[in-house]
Amino acid sequence: MNHPDVANDVRSRLALALDVDDLVEAGRLGRRMLPWFSVAKVGLELFSASGPEAVGAFVDQGYEVFLDLKLHDIPTTVGKAAKVLGSLGVSYVTVHSSGGIDMLAAAVDGLNEGASAAGLTPPMVLAVTVLTSDLEAPGSLLQERLGYAVEADCGGVVCAASDLAEVSLVAPELLAVVPGIRPEGVVANDQGRPATPREAIKQGAGILVIGRAVTASSEPEEAASNIAAEVAEAI
């Protein structure tokens, strides 16, 4: 099933952002891109359109599913929602670190509980540190939120490539998931702090989230191949 030219250690570093509102379209895209990506990111738009069905569709295709819902509410509510999400078979769930330690810990506990009840491996909580579109956030905010993630037993964080050095310093044990990846020559859109795949991997990124650089390309397979080749050179 895997593309003969793409090693699994490259595919495991690449997440495909399925930022569309139609599960049929997303599914078609998923099938096309499976040779290059091992993680499918289901965000608010697709989850709002299709709900848990979207998760099942990509698990069935052979992906690990990264559910990017950025949970943020009182700890009890987040814990209850996380328990439901933990039973769906997802591998990663995003939670806003600005909600604090108790809220992050509630998400971790809820996911563990939901997954255990369903006989599944618990998903990893990815604490969203500072949005890549936020250019004004002080450095101390990142440090504080990394501390929350460690304290709450999150497995990873979502951060900009420009924050990777700080993550390596403060919380090297956390998986760093990096959006805002743009190969050279690809427009940055609304990402305020983009980086090339090579730069991000070299700086310590664990997983790169790739969206429009591939999905909006006139030649998605070629764009994906180029990104995979850059990652292969950098790891």
Image (cartoon, rainbow, N blue to C red):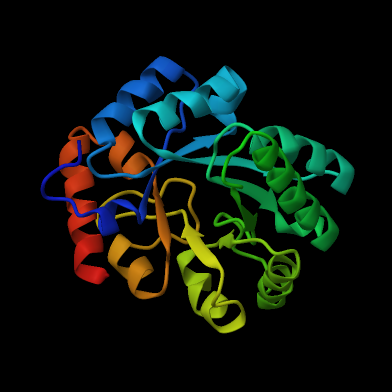
* Viewport quadrant of the N terminus: top left
Which image quadrant is residue 133 in? bottom right
| Residue 24 in the image, given as x and y percentages of width and height | 40, 15
Which percent across, then down, holds residue 89? Answer: 55, 35
Residue shown at 60% from the left, 61% from the top: 155
> In the figure, 148 relative to 24: above or below?
below
Estimate the x, y position of residue 234 in percent, counting from the top left: 25, 70
Q: Is residue 166 above or below residue 158?
A: below
The quadrant holding residue 213 is top left
Residue positioned 28% across, 28% down in the render: 31
Given residues 159 and 121, the one toward you in this image is 121
Pinpoint residue 161: horizontal percent, then vertical percent: 46, 66
Q: Which quadrant would residue 130 be assigned to in this image?
A: bottom right
Residue at (22% x, 40% y) in the render = 35
| In this picture, residue 170 sits left or right of residue 54 | right
User: Could you tell me which quadrant the C terminus lies in?
Assistant: bottom left
Total numbered badges shown on the rendered structure: 0
Relative to residue 210, is residue 6 drawn left or right?
left
Outermost residue toward the left in this view: 4
